[in-house]
Image (spheres, rainbow, N blue to C red):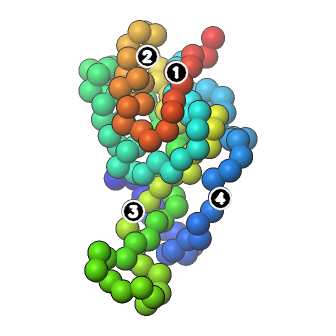
């Protein structure tokens, strides 16, 4: 799973998810990309599932770039813990995705293969996505 090696603080506040993306809005590395249309928290497990399905479909051909990184810790208490007793322990990490963010990029494959691979990856993500190309 993706997670930061070191963080300045162990636990984080709940940041707002509003607004449109102002960075990671252009294809930088590959020829094709997967762009988000809505805002959401994407967990490291979902990113890994999308990466695996893209790699498997392309038969390990071409290149895949992951443009989002889960650096926000999400805390949780156990199931039968009473209310109170402070903030829970870090449970998992998420990446904050805003509308317009390029989440994945792909290069070195044909448009049809990239489209199908990105479509399979989009089904693994909790955000509405759009397949885009550089040209």
Q: Is residue 53 above or below residue 72?
A: above
- Residue assigned mark 3: 92
Task: Estimate how packed mark 4 is, as few (under 14), some (14 to 19) or many (20 or more) residues with alpha carbons within 10 Å.
Answer: few
Q: Quadrant of the C terminus?
A: top right
How far apart are the alpha carbons under marks 3 and 1? 28 Å
- Residue assigned mark 2: 115
Q: Which residue is drawn at 35% across and 49% down?
A: 45
How far apart are the alpha carbons under marks 1 and 4? 26 Å
Q: Residue at x 51, y 33 (%)?
A: 128
* 63 vs 100, nearest the viewer: 100
Q: In this view, does 129 lie above or below 68?
A: above
**Of callouts 2 and 4, the N-terminal one:** 4
Task: Estimate how packed mark 1 is, as few (under 14), some (14 to 19) or many (20 or more) residues with alpha carbons within 10 Å.
Answer: some
Residue 25: x %, y % from top left: 66, 33
Task: Estimate how packed mark 2 is, as few (under 14), some (14 to 19) or many (20 or more) residues with alpha carbons within 10 Å.
Answer: many
- Residue assigned mark 1: 131
Q: Residue at x 31, y 76 (%)?
A: 78
- Residue assigned mark 4: 16
**Of callouts 3 and 1, the N-terminal one:** 3
How far apart are the alpha carbons under marks 2 and 4? 31 Å
How far apart are the alpha carbons under marks 2 and 1? 7 Å
Q: Residue at x 36, y 36 (%)?
A: 124
- Image-based side of 45 in relation to 15, left or right: left
**Of callouts 1 and 4, the N-terminal one:** 4
* 93 vs 7, nearest the viewer: 93
Q: Mark 1, mark 4: which one is toward the viewer?
A: 4
Q: Can residue 1 be seen in this view?
A: yes
Mark 3, secondary structure of its residue: strand
Pointer 2 and pointer 1: residues touching (CB < 8 Å)? Answer: yes
């Amino acid at each position: 799973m993706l997670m930061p090696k070191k963080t300045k603080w162990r636990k984080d506040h709940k940041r707002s998810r509003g607004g449109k993306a102002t960075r990671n809005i252009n294809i930088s590395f590959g020829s094709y990309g997967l762009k988000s249309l809505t805002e959401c928290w994407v967990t490291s497990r979902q990113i890994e599932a999308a990466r695996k399905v893209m790699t498997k479909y392309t038969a390990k051909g071409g290149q895949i770039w992951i443009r989002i990184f889960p650096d926000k810790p999400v805390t949780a208490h156990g199931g039968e813990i009473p209310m109170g007793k402070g903030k829970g322990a870090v449970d998992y990490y998420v990446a904050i995705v805003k509308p317009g963010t390029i989440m994945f990029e792909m290069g070195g494959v044909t448009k049809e293969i990239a489209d199908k691979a990105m479509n399979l990856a989009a089904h693994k993500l909790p955000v509405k996505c759009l397949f885009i190309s550089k040209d």
